[in-house]
Image: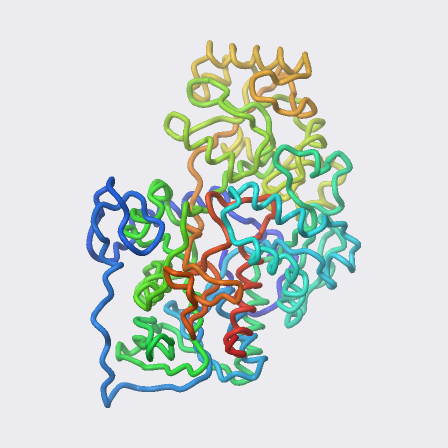
Amino acid sequence: MKDNSTGGISRRSFLTGSALFGATAVAGAAALSGCAPSNGGGATAPGGSSSTGGAGETAQATPSFLTPPAPIAPTAEMQTLDCDVCVVGLGLAGVSALREATEQGAKVIGIEKGTDLGYRSGEFGAFGSELIHKKLGIPQPATQEAVNELMKVMGNRPNALLLNHWIANSGADIDWYISTVDFELLPNDHSNPVGDKEMIVLPERFPINPNYDWRTENYPCFPGMVHLLPDHGPALRAGFAQAQAAGAQAFFNTKGEQLIKEGDRVVGIYATGEDGGLLRINASKGVILTCGDMSSDREMLEYYCPQALSYGPYFSTMDAQGQPVNTGDGQKMALWAGAVMEEGPYAPMTHSLGTNSIGIDPFLMVNVNGVRFANEDVGAQELQNQIKRQPGGNTWQIFDAKWPEQLEFMPQCFGGVSHFVPAEQEAEYDHIINHFAGGYASKSYFQGEIEAGSIIEAASIEELAEKTGIPAAALQTTIARYNELAAAGVDEDFCKVSSRLFAVDTAPFYAVNFGDSGMLVVIGGIDVDEKLRALDPDKVVIPGLYVAGNTQGGRFLVDYPVTVAGASHSMALAFGRLAGRMAAEQA
């Protein structure tokens, strides 16, 4: 995922570096799930009422992180730095805040707990970009349609004013973000790069499949999302370098410890520097917390989001000791300064994406007992939610030899595949076939996945049952019922649209295993107003304290929607930039 190189990318690296996450993510999650550090205090007993501080519903005793540490006392030998704005955490939101505040004329210092800038992958949910959408003529819905759909998926819990700001500015923000990079814009999702630019901008699922109309979908996915390849690292580094050239300072291996307050106002931060000594940073206009999420702090997960404990965290940013940096540091510092966590339920970001060839296409899906359990025609996140409920959290996607001709009827969504590429055109489309669940499949790539074991092939249903371990009689009964529904053209069991109700009756037969996915982040953070100023429990602004990115609340709740693929990246960019501007203006 993470590519720290600064040179251009060749066509070969474009092909090999374009995967979002799949088996690698699950492997990474398994490797890291046992490494999540507890931030003191041990496990909190479940049950009982929540303590002060936010959305916890299962904690019986007050967890350790809700008890503020002893105040740090300044000493004569403590190094002191002065600035207008201090940005704590240098991922996408932090670098955006650093650059924007600097461009607004502020003197800015950024600190980062890790050894480097933090980033991964490169999907952005943006609307109305001059450099992308308008240049290519990509049609998009009215932005409020997208916000309304997002609010429905998330139980109407996020801050709609924040979402309105994001979506109205997302096009201009992505233009601002990529303008510092020498990039190549592909004219569609299946063109090969012709140059050797530092970054490729790929318009996802463009042109739009004529069989796909988001307005009629059970789970609509909006067109016009973009992918920065091999990831968005080149844009992040270019923006960071531009901020440095304009005077911003940055310190890595430097961990924020406590905010400094004078009366009600936050005026700076104490941090532990690379040498282990304490550092005082005075920030006359404010501190911006962009420290990431809490997915690697077990105690915080137990208190705020216990359902996330069953997922292994998957991320790329580590500190100098090789430990994950996403341990809720920003949330804790804000809480100790009088802020409050937003009301939950919080949203773990987990995706089921299947294989490159088939993705999450809504073919028949059964659990390990051979039972169909839900409408398969939902988003990647929502599909995982249903998989998690099944015995062992394990399921199988079942389809037959007619899959190539069925792809054109599949949803044009995140993780979906809706185009079949004939053998004579594979060379022309090879980059998008190799792009994980990029929307295109071919027979040769499909065969490669069979050989790799990610797709199971069988000459009969009985053989498929034997290879998957599904009880043969149950699987045959389920398929017979499914074929009956397909013949009638009506899904009386789960109401899947008839255009995606395909009988499983032509050998060879195939199965793809769907189990646990990795967890990228747990989204839930400090309550903020529309200027990203931290709020106390009475919704009163804490002067001088701004919050953005995954440390911020108000963006995603209940569940992470994939109706706008890449919305998390896009919001981190938008709100990081807004926080930088607000802090520089002391708004």
Q: How many marks?
A: 0
Q: In the figure, residue 426 lies in which quadrant?
A: top right
Colouring of the image: rainbow
Horizontal arrangement in the rendering, residue 270 relative to residue 169 (left or right) = left
Q: In the figure, residue 518 lies in which quadrant?
A: top left
Farthest residue to the bottom: give it. 76
Residue shown at the point (20%, 55%) measured from the top left = 41
Q: In the figure, residue 132 lies in which quadrant?
A: bottom right
Residue shown at the point (33%, 80%) measured from the top left = 262
Q: Is residue 54 above or below residue 581?
A: above
Position of residue 344 measured from the top left corner of the image (x, y, whole percent)? 41, 48
Horizontal arrangement in the rendering, residue 91 relative to residue 264 (left or right) = right
Residue sitting nearer the eye, 277 or 10 = 277
Position of residue 486 measured from the top left corner of the image (x, y, whole percent)? 65, 16
Position of residue 137 measured from the top left corner of the image (x, y, whole percent)? 79, 54
Q: Is residue 408 above or below residue 262?
A: above
Residue shown at the point (47%, 65%) measured from the top left = 91
Residue sitting nearer the eye, 444 or 336 = 336
Residue shown at the point (58%, 72%) measured from the top left = 238
Q: Is residue 60 above or below residue 281?
A: above
Position of residue 313 measured from the top left corner of the image (x, y, whole percent)? 38, 49
Residue sitting nearer the eye, 150 or 371 = 150
